[in-house]
Structures are given as C-alpha cells and as structure tokens.
C-alpha cells in the first residue's frame, strides 16, 4: 500500500467569491459551503465563522476538531460520507495550519473552549491555527443523539470541501507511507503472530513457587519465571516554605472531565489528559462534570466532584490568604491500568505546562 500525503500550508483564510487557494491563502465561498451543509434536515440553520490566531475571540461549545483532507482517488471518509472502501492508499491533499471546528448550540453548559488570544492559548494547539467554525442550530423536532451525529457529518463534509480546493495544486511537501503487500508479511519469520503454545513442566506452579521461596530464604540462587518491572526512582521535590505567596494547582488521576467527556478521555489505560478552566469558578457543579474511571465506583464523585478535586476548599484557603493563588486550570487524567510510558509522558506534559505558568506547588488527588 502506497499513501501520498500532499501537504499544503495555509497562512490565512477569508471569505471570497469562490473557494480556492491563492498562494497560501484559502478563500471560502461562504454561501456555497452553507448551502452544502444546510442539506441536513436535522439543522434549522447553520452559520460559518472564521477564527484566527491572535484574534480577540473565544470558540465555545466545541464538539470536535478536524484537519481538512481530500483523497484524489477513492472514497472520502468511507462509511461516514462515502460508501465503504479501501483507505490508506493513493494521493491525498492535506491543508496544514487549518482546522474545521464543530460546535453545538444545544450544549448550553458546555465548557469546551478554544481561546485565540491571551494566556489560555498555550493550553490548546488550536489557538495557533486558522479555524473554520461550524455553528449549526438543531431543528425543533431533532433527536439530540441524531443531531450530534449530523454535526459530525457536517464537519467531515466541510473538511473534504475545503481540502478539495487543493486537488490541482502541487503540495508544499509530500510525505510517503508504504506497507508491503500482505503476501510479504505472511509467515512467523516476517510477521510475529504472538501465538501462545502450551508447554509441560516437571512440577506444577505451586511447587515451583515454593521452591523459589525456599531458595531465597536459604540464600541460594534462584530465577523467577516472571521478569520484575524496573521503575525509575523520582526524588521528591522540597516542600514549599511560604504557601501564602505560592500558586497552587489541582491535578487528579481520578478521571474528572467536563459533561459528556467530549475529549473522549479513556476510563482505563489512558493516553491523554484534559484541561478544565476554573478561573472565577468557586464550585464544581455536578451537572457540568462527569467522572470516568474504570478503577473505582464513581457514583459518589459524580454526585459531588469535590470528593475528588477539592476546588471548594482551595477557594476558601485562597480567600483566607493561606495560599497565594489557585491556578486557573485543573489537569485531569485517568490512572487505571496506565502504561508506564503513557503515564510518564502525561505527567511530564502536565508538569511542563504548570512550570511555564509559574505554579509553585500541586495537590494531586487520586481515587
């Protein structure tokens, strides 16, 4: 399989008489795109807006974010927009530095935001991209689950429509991805198949375990049948001397997310974390937050998120001057069955953000 990703860098986007790319500027026929997306019967109407880096703008009620792509040969988003078909092969145009932002007007309590300027831009890479924002309004009779699916399809249609403007262009850069034919991968020598085979031992597991334990007690050499994991030793940071001038952040691996878990943080084996803005928020409203975690019963935490993240207590300490300031974001992930590599990467990413924000200390809550 041979996949060619033709990357076209976009430096600016604006509305124009027709959808085309001139130099590195994307011009969008606003009415044509609105007409295309308005064919969805679950929409009462749909608006298209543009948001640029550095602009005094905040995108709210974000559902999903897409990079515009268009396959020159073959189906686009097969199974969603086009019929089922082969993916991962053929030439594809990709618009870099440009995103399609899906939003939902029915998410009245949504707290998923993107700031295009100000200090919060560093918490999302999409504050630095040119964004085409879709703002659909549901029809009065629309089922909300079907409406959200329609929003997703509208985002896919917009992504294909925009990237199609580059189909005749020579890409700024081409990335090639190749896989050998399936026949080349056949056989255990070329492709590890992970087949487990039964083997017979002279003693049952219980006797072998007792023999190893006795050998260890007697100081004799022994070899475990299971390799023990090796973990890096982390030296604890020194304590804070003056809390009254310190900036304190709240971090949890207990699975706190905004309502509906729009960022799809995994309840187990996490690969990501979420950032929740709490600037000016004194309490965590259970109607606006969920707890997703497969390692414990989340019922009590869902009833009152402060059982997991003590924002209310921290605000009281802030008012009393016991701490200098509470950091304006909560960072959260899930800790159940996390791979050491993922947990290390998540922890380092959160730590780098907190350090760059001038945070002096962290309260880390768990399950």
Image: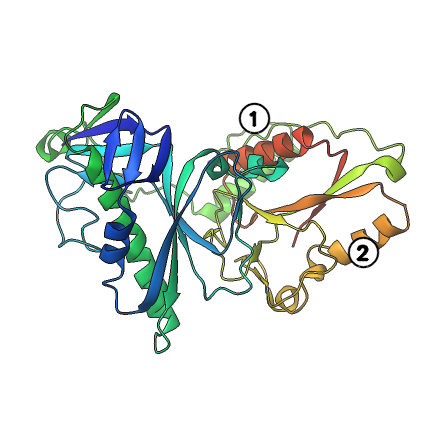
Compared to residue 164, the image places residue 64 above or below, namely: below
Residue at the image point whose x is 89% and y is 45% from the top:
322
Q: How is the image coloured?
A: rainbow
Taking 280 as reference, is 339 left or right?
left
- Where residue 85 sits: x, y (%)? 12, 48
Compared to residue 116, the image places residue 102 above or below, namely: below
Res. 45 mark: none
Q: Secondary structure at mark 1?
A: loop
Q: Residues within 10 Å of mark 2 (few under 14, many from 20)?
A: few
Taking 360 as reference, is 94 left or right?
left
Q: Is residue 250 visible?
A: no
Taking 271 as reference, is 244 left or right?
right
- Label 1 to label 2: alpha-carbon separation: 54 Å
Instruction: Find residue 258 and report its image quarter.
Output: bottom right
Of residue 177 and residue 119, the one placed in the foreground of this image is 119
Compared to residue 98, the image places residue 161 above or below, namely: below
The quadrant of the picture occupied by the C terminus is: bottom right
- Where residue 107 sits: x, y (%)? 49, 64
Q: Earlier in the sequence, mark 1 or mark 2?
A: 1
Seen from this angle, which residue lies furthest front?
A: 17
Q: Residues within 10 Å of mark 1 (few under 14, many from 20)?
A: few
- Where residue 150 sits: x, y (%)? 30, 62
Q: Between tags 1 and 2, which lies in front?
A: 2
Residue indicated by mark 1 = 221
- Where residue 181 sits: x, y (%)? 10, 31
Of residue 69 and residue 207, the one placed in the foreground of this image is 69
Q: Secondary structure at mark 2?
A: helix
Instruction: Find residue 152 and report its image quarter.
Output: bottom left
Residue indicated by mark 2 = 313
The quadrant of the picture occupied by the N terminus is: top left
Q: Mark 1 and mark 2 in contact? Answer it, CB < 8 Å.
A: no
Of residue 30 and residue 38, the one placed in the foreground of this image is 30
């Amino acid at each position: 399989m041979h996949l060619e990703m033709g990357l076209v860098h976009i430096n600016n986007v604006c509305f124009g008489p027709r959808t085309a790319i001139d130099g590195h500027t994307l011009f969008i026929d606003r009415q044509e795109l609105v007409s295309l997306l308005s064919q969805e019967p679950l929409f009462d109407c749909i608006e298209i807006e543009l948001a640029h880096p550095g602009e005094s703008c905040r995108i709210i009620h974000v559902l999903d974010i897409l990079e515009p792509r268009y396959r020159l040969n073959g189906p686009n988003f097969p199974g969603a927009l086009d019929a089922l078909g082969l993916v991962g092969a053929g030439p594809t145009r990709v618009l870099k530095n440009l995103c399609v932002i899906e939003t939902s007007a029915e998410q009245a309590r949504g707290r998923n935001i993107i700031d295009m300027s100000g200090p919060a831009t560093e918490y999302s890479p999409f504050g630095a991209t040119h964004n085409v924002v879709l703002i659909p309004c549901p029809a009065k009779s629309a089922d909300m689950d079907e409406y959200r699916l329609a929003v997703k399809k509208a985002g896919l249609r917009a992504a294909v429509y925009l990237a199609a403007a580059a189909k005749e262009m020579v890409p700024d850069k081409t990335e090639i991805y190749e896989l050998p034919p399936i026949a080349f991968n056949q056989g255990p020598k070329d492709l590890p198949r992970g087949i487990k085979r039964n083997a017979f031992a002279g003693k049952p597991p219980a006797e072998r375990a007792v023999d190893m334990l006795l050998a260890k007690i007697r100081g004799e050499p022994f070899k475990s049948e299971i390799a023990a994991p090796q973990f890096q030793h982390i030296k604890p940071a020194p304590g804070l001397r003056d809390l009254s001038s310190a900036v304190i952040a709240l971090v949890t691996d207990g699975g706190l997310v905004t309502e509906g878990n729009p960022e799809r943080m995994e309840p187990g084996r996490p690969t990501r974390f979420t950032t929740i803005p709490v600037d000016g928020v004194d309490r965590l409203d259970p109607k606006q937050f969920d707890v997703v975690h497969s390692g414990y019963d989340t019922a009590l935490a869902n009833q009152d998120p402060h059982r997991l993240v003590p924002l209310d207590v921290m605000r009281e300490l802030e008012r009393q001057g016991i701490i200098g300031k509470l950091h304006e974001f909560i960072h959260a992930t899930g800790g159940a069955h996390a791979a050491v590599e993922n947990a290390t990467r998540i922890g380092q990413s959160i730590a780098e953000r907190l350090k760059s924000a001038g945070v002096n200390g962290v309260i880390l809550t768990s399950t």
